[in-house]
Image (spheres, rainbow, N blue to C red):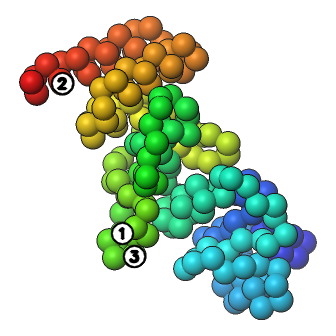
Amino acid sequence: MSARDELWDVAIDQYGYVTTTNAARLGIAPVELSKLTARGALDHISQALYRFPSWPVSANDHLMEAVLWTRDSTAVLSHDTALDVLDLCDINPTTLHLTVSDRKYPIRRRDVPPDLVIHYEQLDPTQRGWWEQIPTVTAVTVIEQGIRTDVRPDLLHQAINTAHHRSMIDTATAEHLRGVLTRKYRHES
């Protein structure tokens, strides 16, 4: 199988994107990515990130691109972004929020695009999930993040109710989250 075909198999699950890390795991040297780019088989998007130009463009491309841009295998959509994509409440974030836990590749603040916010948090595997093939935090995790980061209480109540209604969280978890939210705002008043 050619390097292009091996990378294509990876790109299928990543909205047409591949990384130098993906290539290394396949035993493909970085020079092969450069050759594929020179031949027009790949577009160089940013450092260590490439995309097959023949892959159809979708409305979610920017989300997968952001996750892969971090070069962190633990990166997930989180906070306001996860509340939005999971459609838990009527939030309309102006920035894209990602959580990473691997500080092996620390992201320099000056390198972060202005519309991207990086959070560092060690997430348990049970706190991670998927939305449209893109790694994201689970409903309970994003609601907990929202409580910690002062998302408006009415939006968080809506998120709890929506998650419970959709069976993303059980009744006991919904009641626990409502209690945490109530105590937080009672304490702050």
* Secondary-structure class at tag 1: loop
- Residue 64: where, in percent of width, then height? 61, 57
Closer to the observer: label 2 or label 1?
A: 2
Query: If the image is split into quadrants, where does the N terminus sit?
Result: bottom right
In primary-sequence order, the first of circles 2 and 3 is 3
Around disc 1, counting alpha carbons within 10 Å, would you say few (fewer than 14), some (14 to 19), or many (20 or more)?
few
Residue 129 vertical placement versus 34 (above, below):
above
The mark found on residue 33 in the picture is none
How far is disc 2 from disc 3 in space, using C-alphas?
Answer: 34 Å
Q: Quadrant location of residue 51?
A: bottom right
> Toward the viewer: 80 or 5?
80
Around disc 3, counting alpha carbons within 10 Å, would you say few (fewer than 14), some (14 to 19), or many (20 or more)?
few
Residue 36 vertical placement versus 6 (above, below):
below
In primary-sequence order, the first of circles 2 and 1 is 1
Query: If the image is split into quadrants, where does the C terminus sit?
Result: top left
Residue for badge 1: 106
Count of numbered circles in the view: 3
The mark found on residue 184 in the picture is 2
Q: Quadrant location of residue 15?
A: bottom right
- Residue 162: where, in percent of width, then height? 51, 19
In primary-sequence order, the first of circles 1 and 3 is 1
Report the residue at 36% width, 63% height from top.
103
131 horizontally vs 51: left or right: left
> Toward the viewer: 172 or 20?
172
Task: Identify residue type, mark 2.
Answer: Lys
Task: Identify residue type, mark 1.
Answer: Pro
Report the residue at 22% width, 17% height from top.
182
Residue for badge 3: 111
- Residue 25: where, in percent of width, then height? 66, 68
Q: Is residue 32 visible?
A: no
